Image (cartoon, rainbow, N blue to C red):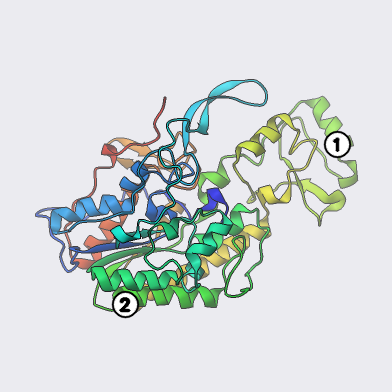
Amino acid sequence: MKKIAYILTGVIVLAGCKPRLPIDTPSSGAADVSVYVAVGNSLTAGYADNSLYRKGQQNSYPSILATQFALVGGGDFKQPLLPGEWGYPDAKLVLGMKTNCAGIASLGPVSYTGWADTVNNAMSIANSGPYNNLGVPGIRTVDYLLNNYATLAQTVGNAGYASRFFKQPGKRPLDELIYTVNTLKPTFFTLWLGANDVLGYATSGGEGAVPGTPVFGLILPGDISPTDMFQKNYDSVVNVLVKDGARGVLLNIPDITAIPLFTTVPIKGLELDAVDAVNLANLHAAAGLQFAEGTDYYVVADAGAAGGRRKIREGEYILLSSPLTDSIKCGGWGKTKPIPEANYLDAEEVAHVKTATATFNQVILLAAQKHGLAHVDMNHFLNTVTTGYKFNGAEFTTEYISGGAFSLDGVHLTPRGYAIVANEIINAINLNYGARIPMADVNSYNGLLFP
């Protein structure tokens, strides 16, 4: 998965007001949380603002859960923490003043320029493990049975995060999980895996294969994972986690087309006067495009359309990125030049993403039912949050920057967003295991920090 896609998974925010169990004397009920292990991808690792950094890790949803678990008998929760705040493998994004291509200064995401305190920290810290947080940015379900994954990941932009803390980097991620389970003997776990099996395809503008074909056991980062391979690997992970009687929570894949990376750039963003409308119609005459004064749809490249271009349609999505938005603003993209196919998702590609997500989520649900595990429907939560989520007077939405739940990469969460996820997990534990674990105070965690 490309850097911003480590993403994934999917991302998320939360359902609006919904019933919660009354909290009396804290109790873990039938859920023994004394030894907790978290398995997943970048969201589990605490990735935020297009990078991984120490405070992000410390405010990951597993870390927040561990804090709440400590109230009901939870023990130590060890993470493979980075030493600083610059970001790994690249500088994180922060809010700052920036001048766009038109020479206009405004507040927006810029690369952190503080002391580079995490540079050259890819060296192994495995001997200080094992670790309770096994979140690996970029990892997919189909990677879990891939030999030498940690080394291979270095070749596709992951910068070797897995090899940084894997005790056995030359083996499969499943082997690392087996080692951790056999050593720590977890009594409880969370598993949030699968978003990257569709996210890489979406963030590449649907340029990959549907589904991908394994080459030496490897699915390319921009492909959608094959269902049979996804199921085999997912079930293998769950079987390892439950083998000694541990209980846990399975989280499904959110609707990634509902996150800011795909919803921030409006598809109907052309502002035209009467002269513009006539000139554009003449320019795109070979494609038969017509334009109206006012607000109109951007022009996108489409090899199957007349003249190789058309207007983008409702239900399609333009990807958020600084180079693209500058090209739209100053380079005529979407107006005099079609937006390239790799920068948007067309209706067919959206359908591929949604179909794969639904299929994979069925695998996750069946695994939860088979093993009697709690299940959190993050896909449903994300699709019902259009009106926002409120916690003690503060409201959070999916809006980029202003919504407060998503970080500056438009995919991963802020600490407050991760706290909301933690609360959804706690609610599921309380409901399914008869527990009374107190909710985290969402407002005690930071949202986006303004300069």
> Which residue does the image show at 67% across and 60% down from the upper left?
348
Disc 1 crowd, CA 10 A, few/some/many (<14, 14-19, 20+): some
Q: Secondary structure at mark 2?
A: helix
Q: Percent from the top left, x then y, of residue 296?
A: 72, 36
- The local secondary structure at tag 1 comes to helix
Q: Give the mark nearest the N terminus, 2 or 1.
A: 1
Q: Which residue is mark 1?
A: 281
Residue 97's spot in the image, x, y percent?
52, 23
Q: Which mark identifies residue 12?
A: none
Q: In the figure, residue 33 lies in which quadrant?
A: bottom left
Residue name at image x 31 percent, y 60 percent: 127
Instruction: Choose top left, top right, bottom left or bottom right for residue 327.
Output: top right
Residue type beneath disc 2 = His
Classify the position of the N terminus by image quarter: bottom right
- What residue did someone put label 2 on? 371
The amino acid beneath tag 1 is: Ala
Q: Position of residue 7 (x, y in %)?
A: 50, 53
